[in-house]
Image (tube, rainbow, N blue to C red):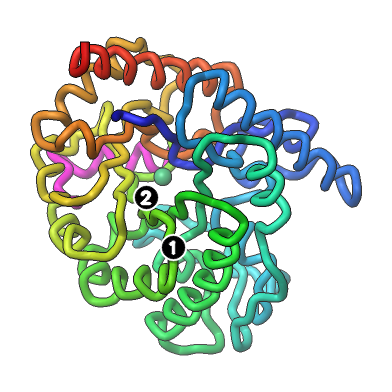
Amino acid sequence: MLETTIAGSLPKPFWLAEPKKLWAPWAQSGAALAEAKRDATLLVLKEQEDAGIDIVSDGEQSRQHFVHGFLAEIDGIDFERRVAMGIRNNRYTAEVPTVTGALKRKRPVHATEAAMARAHTRRKLKFTLPGPMTIIDTVADAHYGDRVKMAMRFAEILNEEALELEAAGVDVIQFDEPAFNVYMDWVKDWGIEALHRARQGLRCTTAVHICYGYGIQANIDWKATLGSEWRQYEEIFPALARSRIDQVSLECINSRVPIELLKLLDGKDVLLGAIDVATDKVETPEEVAATIRRAAKFVAPERIQPCTNCGMAPLDRGVAYGKLRALAAGAAVVRKELRP
Ligand code: ZN
């Protein structure tokens, strides 16, 4: 009960990439980069275990960005043809690559780090992939002329990758869909259908992560415009509750999400954001416990997995691991209350 996990990314050591930065440039190249990625993956597994995290991840040490790390191995995308595009409904502008031809996976994207991670931890292993809607919101299209058609093609490609990750011994495959909180109508029209295509044939646990974004300034400014109550989840949770995705990872602590919305996820595991990734202040175990107790009024504790609000890639390493220890300690406090 109350198994702890993380949303996905963890800070990279300075010898792998420039610290405290999204899209951080690699600090190595060639064989040295491959070795640094491998070493960092081993390190983050050990640090998660030591912190007391039950369902661990590779901390996304082998990818530069949660979307473009995957796209780098897909044919049909021209990374030289970068376009400045407003993404997440124009919340911020990003330099995105362009789809210029039929999409096809060149080779397995994450096979190396998945096999490495599996060989070095006995804990349950989670692997994250970008979701189809978030991918199409992060590329320009000069080929398909139809965003939904392009999303479905990405879903097929994600499915090929997911089936291989499962075969490599991954226990949980999570699709990251921050775009679900932006295009709520699309979620119901085709977003969940695309996730179903991406998870087709999987027997492992599947999750979707839906947050309000990394703790970067553009997101902090956007959140300030959302009013006193953030009700985006209210529009999409009922459809997710009916979906074939097992778990929903969401933002909770320090958000303005009304906690009673969690009951709309009846039947799903809730990966409860009990760690704020937008502040360097490390939560106390008691703050984590308080968040879990609030959620437990609306979700059975057996269905709660205390988690981080989002990825921790841009944080200081010491801060991030302090937060992981607080997460595990807070979950232990509540576990003891429920089963003294
Ligand atoms: Zn997130």
Q: Is residue 121 above or below residue 289?
A: below
Q: Quadrant of ligand 1?
A: top left
User: Horizontal and vertical percent for residue 183?
Assistant: 27, 64
Magenta range is: 216-233
Q: Residues within 10 Å of mark 2 (few under 14, many from 20)?
A: many
Q: Tell me which numbered mark, 1 or 2, is placed earlier along the sequence.
A: 1
Name the foreground residue: 331 vs 219.
331
Residue that label 2 marks: 209
Q: Type of residue at label 1?
A: Gly
For residue 319, side relative to residue 256 (left or right):
right
Can you see residue 112? yes
User: Horizontal and vertical percent for residue 331?
Assistant: 32, 20
Residue appearing at x 18%, y 18% in the figure: 338
User: Horizontal and vertical percent for residue 38?
Assistant: 77, 41
Name the secondary structure under disc 1: loop
For residue 142, side relative to residue 235 (left or right):
right
Q: Quadrant of the N terminus?
A: top left
Residue appearing at x 23%, y 43% in the figure: 225
Q: Quadrant of the C terminus?
A: top left
- Is the residue indicated by label 2 positioned so its CB lies within 8 Å of ligand 1? yes
Q: Residues within 10 Å of mark 1 (few under 14, many from 20)?
A: many
